[in-house]
Amino acid sequence: MAQPLPKGGAAPVPKRVAPWPPVLRAFLWAGIGFVVLAAMAAWLDPSPVSPYLTAVGSVTGWFGALIGWLLGIGGYDYVVRPMMGYPTPRIRTSGWRRYFEYAVDHKVIGLQYLGASTGTFLIAGLIAMAMRFQLMNYRPTLFHYPQDYLNAVGIHGTLMMFTVATVAMVGGLGNYFVPLMIGARETMFPKASGLSIWLVPVGVLTVSMSPLLGQWSTGWRGYEPLAASDGSGLLYYYLGVFALTTSSLIVAINLTSTILFKRTKGMTWNRLPLFAWGILTVSLLNIIWLPEIQTTFILGMMDKVMPLNLFNVFGQPLGYEYLFWLFGHPEVYIVVIPALAIWNEIIPVMGRKSLFARPIAVLGLVFVMLLSGMVWAHHMFTMMRFSEMLPFSFFTEMISIPTGFAYLAVIGTLWNSRLRLTTPTLLVLMSMFNFLIGGLTGLFLADVPANLQLHNTFFVVGHFHFTIIGGMVFSWMAAMYYWLPKFSGRTYSEFWGKLGAIWVFIAFNATFLNFFILGLHGMNRWVSAYPKYLQPENFWTSIAAYLLGAGFGINIIHIVWAWVKGPKVKENPWGAKTLEWQTTSPPPAKNFEELPVVVGSFYTYGKDVPDPVMFPVAQERAPGS
Amino acid sequence: MGSLLVFGLLWVVFSLLGEWGATAWINSAPDGTGPYFGTASNLGVVGAHAFDFLVWVAVPIFVFVVLMIIYAMIRFRSKPGEKMTDAPRQTRNNKVFVGSWILISIVINLLVWLHPNASGLEQVFAAQLPKNNPNPLVVDVTARQWEWIFSYPQYNITQSLNASGQDTLYLPVNRPVKFVLRSYDPFHTYDTAIDVIHGFWIPAFGVKYDVIPGETRILYLTPTELISTEQNPMARVQCSEVCGPGHPYMEANLHVVTGSAFAAWAKQQASGS
């Protein structure tokens, strides 16, 4: 497959380099990388109990597989060889195959992220269905041993957090829309971005296959010191999350620098779209906190392999918990900030009304970002000293003030608007309702005396599903329907869109409102078997959960159908003013024929408001101007 | 102005209705514990009062936002088929609304932090002072994978068991109990390297406190109701922190009995063990 360097003259760009599909080649190279490095480890550090694969070998082998995978998918052809002076081969720009190859176009990468997130949402969602099936009965049925169930919980949580909640709206929608919205032709680091997406399948496969190495029972948080004595599969939990967080870190660096340096003429900070503000604040959170959790996981992994005794009786048993939540709570805001930004992106467009108190809406996002690092230990009220309870409950209460600013802006915008009740509007309003319940139940959990009862019960599980599914997933769906005409030039059926929205709304509330009651009744977390008196309520919760799963299925099928076969619509069907709507749908390779110039606010409506966007060259050329 | 008046009126009416419903919900249980359940100890009562107060705080906030969403969907809806035009009145800011929103949200948050949070914590902290717990019953609680072991040093009971040999917790009603929570006792083997965190939780008492390897923690509480696992399954000792595969089964029965019944039980346990 390697082609010799052409002698003299301009190098002809070779048409295709890969003789067979890059994904297959990546799998092969990953396999080779694993075997080579695992064998080296077995040779250097032999184990008497396992001659072929040791704990050390499975870690070093994984890194070999990672390198082989990244080189095979395109790193070798598009990054390593060009560095050595060979010409960069052509990158496919049309056809479905480009989504399964290395890409540098931020729109292709965005869709790759969206596809990866959606696929993982289905996998982790099916695991949730299995968990609900188990909980229909108070005794083990589907999962015969508690560790089977606990491992399913851990994989469900890890995949949902690190591949869906923190990725779909940042790596997916962020990569696709941020350059379009700020008037850029490409992102700052397209080559790194093209590789970063391919870390996602590595992470997903690593986490989902981890039980093969030995079951782990810690859930998605990997609490020490249990982790140290748990199954070896936990090593692949650390490594899978390492791959996923590295991917998110590259996205964060890429999009932050794109927003800082690639804005078009006239795109001042005061004109920057709300969604771009959301992605900027989230990316800063990612840049601050992802390295922190990666360091913690490396400590956890070394502790397990060596062992270092960092987090058990000989070390600091609570050290890991503090380090985990130091990242873990900002993580919650990494999930929800893009959702808050999307509300204020969609409602002014659908209400034909200027965004109310725009500076407050932006400040809300920024202050949530700043405060989010000061509340983490409220996850540990039952573990901490009494003296720590008052400050952490204080900051926890206070963070609801900037979060409320998103509501302030939406409500001010809704007032006296001419609201079009489309599917995206409906989903934004539903998301506000759900997130409100998530926030208000947070009030109870932030109260320490009540927390000492509610902590680690289903009340908490209900609370965070309301914030994450209710806040983020509903907003993600709203954004998908809103931007569907942009992705494909086609639109969805208003009937099926609304039916799907109402369906998931009712099923979601029926499922997770029950969690609060279950928690108050004494249902604790991480149990596959529970006292019999809780069975009837769990049974009906599970029925609602299946309906919720079916509802998500309906929406996904509908969106895919609309994308491929839906009725064609004109450009900019919503009459939105932001820049992504000022180009063709789907956008061309370099986004804009001519870079737009921003001369006004995107969120100002009303009589005699001039167009905020200008195309000086095109307008000069146009006859009669 | 008309819309504002209508909305304000609706908000007051629905908030009052909501508060009425919340109060009925709170008073629905015979002992006034409402939806909180875990009130069979002095600490549980503190949590229940906090919970009830927060329900009352949350109702008007919930009504405000939800009513606004519904109100906007009806009142400010653009009719289907109507030509897409900008809203006639474009208010981009309103200092009174924004200012009062920020002020009220700061006041509410400070309020709920002070009461019920700080005021409740003051009671919890006071309840943990030895001088406020005269003549306590000392129960050494050992948490290990996956068993609760209870010993009563004042009564020479090294491990309290029921007739089937299961660990069981007996407590006298209305007498302070000093739980000594640790993961090691002198009567059982102990491997420091695999010791993990457990959570000592009695749902009916409305309180839990974690047992950390290498640490000994004290929890004082006073049971206030005669309950037992047989008659109320929330009266049980349950591990609340995931501690490995045996976690769901790490539970023990609880009996809160009268002082004389407890004395009789202790005598029988001490002679039996």
Image (cartoon, coloured by chain):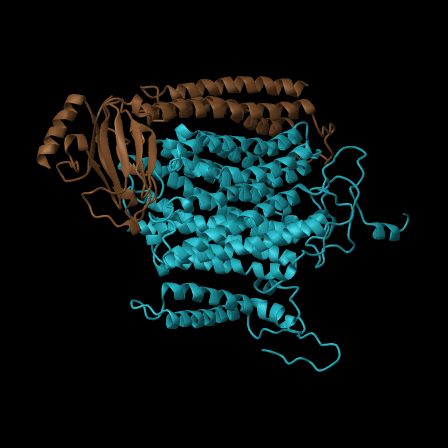
Chain colours: A cyan, B brown
Taking the view exactly as shown, the residue that stands out farthest to the bottom is A7
Side of B45 relative to A562 (left or right): left
Q: Is residue B181 visible?
A: yes
Q: Residue at x 39, y 28 (%)?
A: A449
Side of A306 relative to B9 (left or right): left
**x, y percentage for residue B89?**
73, 27
Judging depth in this view, the residue of B132 and A490 nearest the camera is: B132
Judging depth in this view, the residue of A68 and A543 nearest the camera is: A68
Q: Quadrant of the N terminus of chain A?
A: bottom right
Count of numbered circles on the image: 0
Q: Quadrant of residue A388?
A: top left
Q: Is residue A208 visible?
A: no
**x, y percentage for residue A400?**
54, 32
Q: Residue at x 68, y 49 (%)?
A: A259
**x, y percentage for residue B269?**
12, 33
**x, y percentage for residue A456?**
38, 38
Q: Residue at x 41, y 56 (%)?
A: A301
Side of B35 relative to A334 (left or right): left
Taking the view exactly as shown, the residue that stands out farthest to the left is B271
Taking the view exactly as shown, the residue that stands out farthest to the right is A624
